Structures are given as C-alpha cells and as structure tokens.
Amino acid sequence: MDFAKVFLVGGIICVIGQILMDTTKLTPARILVIFVVSGVVLQAFGIYEKIEKFGLSGARVPLPGFGFTLAKGVMEEVDRIGLLGVITGGVKSASAGIAAAIVFGYLMSVIFNSKSKM
C-alpha cells in the first residue's frame, strides 16, 4: 500500500507541475521556485508534514519536499538554539541531499560524455 501512496502523492505533484508548464507562460525555473516556496509555506502552516507522513518519499523527493526539509530544519534549530537557527537550520537539514546531488552529478559527468544541444 505504501507504493500506491508514494505514487499518488508524487504523481499529483508532477501533474501540478505539468499543468503549470502547459497552461501558463511560467518558465521551468519559476515553477521550481514556486514548488520550493510552496513546500516552505505549507510546512510553516503544518500542512506539508501531514502530506509527507501520508505520501512518504512521494512527498519528500520532489521540490516541495526540499522546501519542507529546509523549513523543518529551520524550525527545529530555532527551537534549539534561537535566532541563529534561521541561518544554520536549513543548511544542516538539507546538506546531505545537496552533497549527494553534487557527488552523483560529478560522477555521472565523469562516466558519460555530455554534448551540447546545438
């Protein structure tokens, strides 16, 4: 049943992105920003954590999940160390994912030859 939940939540997020690309003149970069900010805002109101508990990695992996991770880290650090947590919380909570993306991106660039689309 978990696979169905993951597929449902991740699919809904992707459908929203596809609808935004097809029906608006927003660039993919702006849609990316909208998704990350929406994850932060939904977590600020306590909504995204409920979505994440239901949808598991279907809610964690897409871009709103990154915003959720940043917001949750900031909220935890502010509770723990005070105002300095605004600066350190997001960095601490998302550092493993960012480092993995950099390392695996580098490995793929070493293994495969990329070519420009000209």
Image (cartoon, rainbow, N blue to C red):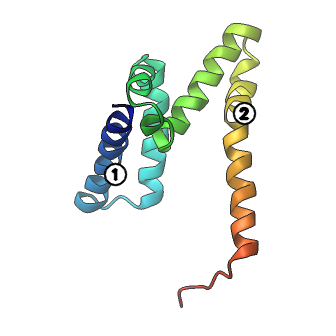
Image side of residue 97 versus residue 37, left or right? right
How many other residues sit within 10 Å of disc 2, few (<14), some (14-19) or many (≥20)?
some
Question: Residue 58 shows which numbered tag?
Answer: none
Instruction: Give the x, y percent position of residue 106.
Output: 74, 64
Name the image quarter holding residue 18: bottom left
Instruction: Give the x, y percent position of residue 55.
Output: 39, 31
30 above or below 3? below
Name the image quarter holding residue 77: top right
Question: Residue 17 shows which numbered tag?
Answer: 1
Q: Earlier in the sequence, mark 1 or mark 2?
A: 1
Pick whichever, 86 or 18, lies toward us. Answer: 18
Q: Amino acid at mark 1?
A: Gly
| Residue farthest front in this picture | 1
> Quadrant of the image for the N terminus?
top left
- Please give the name of the residue rendered at 55% of the width and 38% of the height, measured from the top-left corner: 66
Instruction: Give the x, y percent position of residue 79.
Output: 67, 8
Q: Amino acid at mark 2?
A: Val
- Please give the name of the residue rendered at 76% of the width and 73% of the height, measured from the top-left corner: 110
Image side of residue 19 versus residue 112, left or right? left
Pick whichever, 108 or 41, lies toward us. Answer: 108
76 above or below 36? above
114 above or below 63? below
Name the image quarter holding residue 105: bottom right
Question: Residue 91 shows which numbered tag?
Answer: 2
> Quadrant of the image for the C terminus?
bottom right
Mark 1 touching mark 2, by CB under 8 A? no
Pick whichever, 6 or 67, lies toward us. Answer: 6
How many other residues sit within 10 Å of disc 1, few (<14), some (14-19) or many (≥20)?
some
Local secondary structure at mark 2: helix
Pick whichever, 1 or 100, lies toward us. Answer: 1
